[in-house]
Image (cartoon, rainbow, N blue to C red):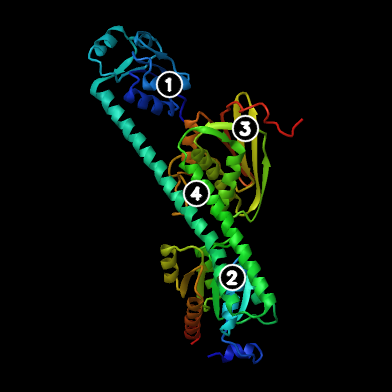
Amino acid sequence: MAETTAAMFGGHKTNGLVLVVDDEPDVRKVVRMTLEKTGYDVIEAEDGEKAIEAIHQGENPLMLDVIITDIRMPKINGVEAINYFQQQWPRVPLIVLTGFPDMEMATGFLNKGIVDYLVKPVEKEKLIKSVATAMEKRDLNRL
Amino acid sequence: MSTVEPPITIAILGAGKGGTAMLESFLNLPHIRLLGIADTNPHALGFQLARLHNIPTVSHPLKLIQEDKVNLIIDVTGDPILPSYITEHKHSGAEVLGGTAAKVLSELIRHQTFIQAQLFQSEKLASMGTFASGIAHDINNPLYVILAMAEEIQEETNLDRIRLHAASIHEAAQRIQAISRNITDYVRSSSHQELERIDLHARLDEALSISRFATKFREITVQKHYQNGLSVQAKPEEMLQVFINLITNAIHAMEEKGSLTITTSHSNGTVQIAISDTGCGISPEHLQKIFNPFFSTKPKGQGTGLGLYNVKTIVKKYHGDLQVESEQGKGTTFRLSFPAIPPVDDQVFDGQP
């Protein structure tokens, strides 16, 4: 399953590439630490626009496997953020990681096809499990 | 536009509960002019309110009902002799509303007051919800950093990295401390229910820091032009509610970029506060409706439409005034004014020549 991604990174073995979008640098750092230990590659961005820049900075756009995003960000928020990512990268599974424990919003997002709605502070195991589920979904999306 | 009709001139007989509720209600109606209120009891409930609004108060109804300008006499006294007395002495052009009809009107007004109080309460609850989720978000972010970094330190052996993680934990804990301090200040101020002398600038600053939880300031700069030593007499919680509402509206209008200016001044026995933003402005057709209950331009579920309505209600309660100027694309200014109260002592101009 990891062949395509591994090939992209010049043979370097990885479980997949995760984009972490959050306006707080320390939050991005914490997510990165957790995921890198589990064998994922991580790129960070503070908002959706920066995410696109990060993806396109090389000669070829990076192949994203999973996106983890906060939903309270500058300029766009909530549903808009989800729509934005789903339009940009329709096949890439989304995980919402937010400080808002909002059941109604969570249900709404899950109905829109996001993989998980995680509330900060999220336990390490829960985050890792959620990313693993997203990776499986990504494989299905690519079939 | 319809032609301007002359106001309806009303005399109220009876300044007890019914008369007072009526008086209060009529004060808010632009097409009604109150000629006066009568009651044999000089300490009647409604007299105080009437005097505050310069409505004449009299102990005997005769002069009021004989007045040639009076269009309508409302009798809520319940006095059995009064109806025939009114018929006999009133100005010939005046209509009379008394007995059961006056009672029904009185009931309607009381019901309206009750609904108003409920609206007020529901906005308070709704804004409390926004406030609470804003706080939750602001606490959960640093909390996540603290928990994850602490876990990391337990497994980390590199001293430099441990120091870096500890610095992140320290910074995150400080942010939570600041939030907690602000909340306790807010709670302390809302438990006071008494009228008290309010330091305007302390309340404005407090409202600013609370508004930071509910909104995103981002690239918004705040300019304060405060004139020293201004106070008003009010319940601190309500004054705070007014400021928070106006400030968060201003911030929302700017969409994270612009300038918020708060100016205070003092003249002719009133204290003025202007809150200006450089945001999107309000269209002329919306401008007429912004103080109406349930009017909101925010998406469903995000605004109660009661914020400015309650601001207006509170301002009125303290005999203040609220004006708005707005230009689309340029910004909006809300001007508040309240009766000034004299400073505690004359040494308020500390540091000033």
Q: Earlier in the sequence, mark 4 or mark 1?
A: 1
Question: Residue B343: x percent and y percent?
Answer: 62, 28
* Within-10-Å neighbours for mark 4: few <14, some 14–19, many 20+: few
Q: Earlier in the sequence, mark 4 or mark 3?
A: 3
Q: Disc 4 is attached to a residue of which chain?
A: B
- Tell us which disc is closer to us: 1 or 2: 1
Q: How many labels does the image show?
A: 4
Q: Disc 3 is attached to a residue of which chain?
A: B
- Tell us which disc is closer to us: 4 or 3: 3
Quadrant holding the C terminus of chain B: top right
Q: Eyeballing the image, is B140 above or below B276?
A: below
Residue B230: give its label. 3
Q: Which residue is drawn at 55% across and 47% down?
A: B249
Q: Mark 4 points at which residue?
A: B297
Question: Residue B260: x percent and y percent?
Answer: 64, 46
Q: Which residue is drawn at 54% across and 65% down?
A: B143
Find numbered disc 3 in the image and state the secondary structure of the residue it sits on.
Answer: loop
Q: Name the residue under label 1.
A: B48
Q: How far apart are marks 3 and 1 (CA)?
A: 26 Å
Q: Disc 2 is attached to a residue of which chain?
A: A
Contact, mark 3 vs mark 1 (Cβ under 8 Å): no
Q: Distance between the residues labelled 4 and 3?
A: 34 Å
Residue A21: give its label. 2
Find numbered disc 2 in the image and state the secondary structure of the residue it sits on.
Answer: strand
Q: What residue type is labelled 3?
A: Leu
Question: Residue B182: x percent and y percent?
Answer: 55, 50
* Left or right placement of residue B112 versus residue A66 in this view: left
Same chain? Circles 4 and 3: yes
Q: Residue at x 47, y 76 (%)?
A: A126
